[in-house]
Image (tube, rainbow, N blue to C red):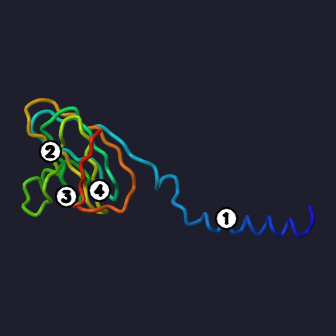
Amino acid sequence: MRAGGWVRCVGISLTLGCAGSELPSRSETASRRGVVVASGPSVKAVTVGPATIHAFSADKGGGLYFVPFNTGTDADCAANANDATAPSRAIIEADRRLVFSVTEGDLACLATEGRGRFELLWHTYPGPGMRAAAMAQTKR
């Protein structure tokens, strides 16, 4: 290879190497997923922000709300479940996907009202996070 070819190769490698250093790592872009099962009236922690969350349930009688993250457990959700300052709940309709964002420092919680079993399937994608006012429901 001629000297000019090596110079171009090194230049391109340095350019791409430096540009790639600002890209998010695999762990920062990996999605999280889970299942939350509740029996009867209860509150459960789902996930912490920042993230965009897709939630789905075949059952009715559940809703999502947000509280400030403290311990990341069901206790955070229970302590703020009836707080007047907590954002309004988003109702999870049966057989429909709920898409919403949670900001950094907040914890998404599930509240169920019925006497039966409620199963929530969810997955997240890291995102800028917005408050509950930015929620949108979409068909499955």
Whichever of callouts 2 and 3 sits on the residue coming sooner in the sequence is 3
Q: Amino acid at mark 4?
A: Ser
* Residue shown at the point (15%, 59%) measured from the top left: 87
Return the residue at label 4: 101
SS label for mark 3: strand
Q: CA distance from mark 2 to mark 3?
A: 12 Å
| x and y, in percent, of residue 65 in the image | 18, 53
Asked whether the beta carbons under mark 4 and mark 2 sit within 8 Å of each other, the answer is no
Whichever of callouts 4 and 1 sits on the residue coming sooner in the sequence is 1
Q: Amino acid at mark 2?
A: Ala
Q: Amino acid at mark 1?
A: Gly
Q: CA distance from mark 4 to mark 1?
A: 32 Å
SS label for mark 1: helix
Q: CA distance from mark 3 to mark 1?
A: 41 Å
Q: CA distance from mark 1 to mark 2?
A: 47 Å
* Residue shown at the point (22%, 32%) measured from the top left: 58
Question: Which mark's residue is nearer the viewer, 4 or 1?
Answer: 4
Return the residue at label 3: 67
Return the residue at label 2: 111
Vertical placement of 13 versus 73: above or below?
below
- Specify the farthest residue to the top: 116
| Label 2 environment density (alpha carbons within 10 Å; few <14, some 14–19, many ≥20) | many
